[in-house]
Amino acid sequence: MIYLKSLQENSKNGFNDMLRKHYEVILQHYGNATTKRSGVPLMNHIDEGLLILDALKANQLAKAAYCVHPIVQGALEMNSSGKSLKEWQHKIDAEVMYIAGRYSLLANSYLCRPETDHYTISDVQSLISLYGGMPEVLDMLRADKIQNAKDFNQYHKGTHPRSAELANYFDIWQKALGITESRRDELYALITH
């Protein structure tokens, strides 16, 4: 609820009903759930990602789609029954669902797995071209990869069994998305507590 409270207190961030609606959907979906390894509330990913999207000057559609991307992305992953999406799709606007779906297809095309460890920046740039790099989708990817990399560095770097591969994975995504080291550091600073 950090981001929602921030927006309510400071309306200059462009808070609107579409963003509120989709933020509340993911808030209801996640509830008080936390991550398995670090115990961080799942909503932290959404709150910090939205702060990054603000810094990127992303539009409201990108922010609303970012809110619900975990629901849509989870439904599109292999072996998913789509049950979660069926529970929530009546609450998600069609255009938001479309952007979250496009994001999910691109994000799922390169996950950190042994079969993709050989991927390069050029490979990921090709995937971006193949899936069509819509501005909303690219901003969502930037926010997602920066936020996930921050959590990785803070909680798992050096202790995760695939630590080296994960560090390389985040580096490849960030470079393919045009995020410089200085910009990355600025965005990390926004969300580091």
Image (cartoon, rainbow, N blue to C red):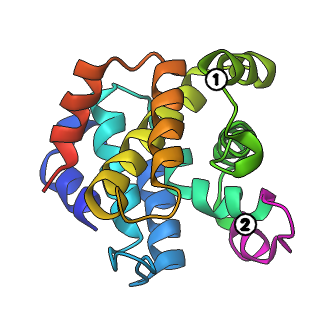
Q: Is residue 104 above or below residue 151?
A: above
Of the 4 image quadrants, the one containing the N terminus is: bottom left
* Tag 1: amino acid: Thr
In the image, is 2 to the left or to the right of 170?
A: left
Residue at image mark 2: 90
Q: CA distance from mark 2 to mark 1?
A: 38 Å
Q: Is residue 79 magenta?
A: yes
Q: Position of residue 116 (x, y in %)?
A: 72, 40
The residue range painted magenta reads 76-89
Q: Is residue 27 magenta?
A: no
Q: Residue at x 37, y 55 (%)?
A: 152
Element class at badge 1? loop
Left or right? Give the position of 186 relative to 135. left
Instruction: Residue under label 1, please give it.
Output: 120
Neighbour tally class for label 2: few under 14, some 14-19, many 20 plus, Cα within 10 Å: few
Is residue 138 visible in the rendered image? The answer is yes
The image quarter containing residue 85 is bottom right
Where, quadrant-wise, is the C terminus in this rendering? bottom left
Total marks shown come to: 2
Q: Is residue 71 above or below residue 185?
A: below
Residue 80 relative to residue 165: left or right: right
* Residue shown at 30% from the left, 34% from the top: 54
Task: Name the residue type under label 2.
Answer: His
Instruction: Decide: is 74 above or below 126.
Output: below
Q: Residue at x 41, y 77 (%)?
A: 37
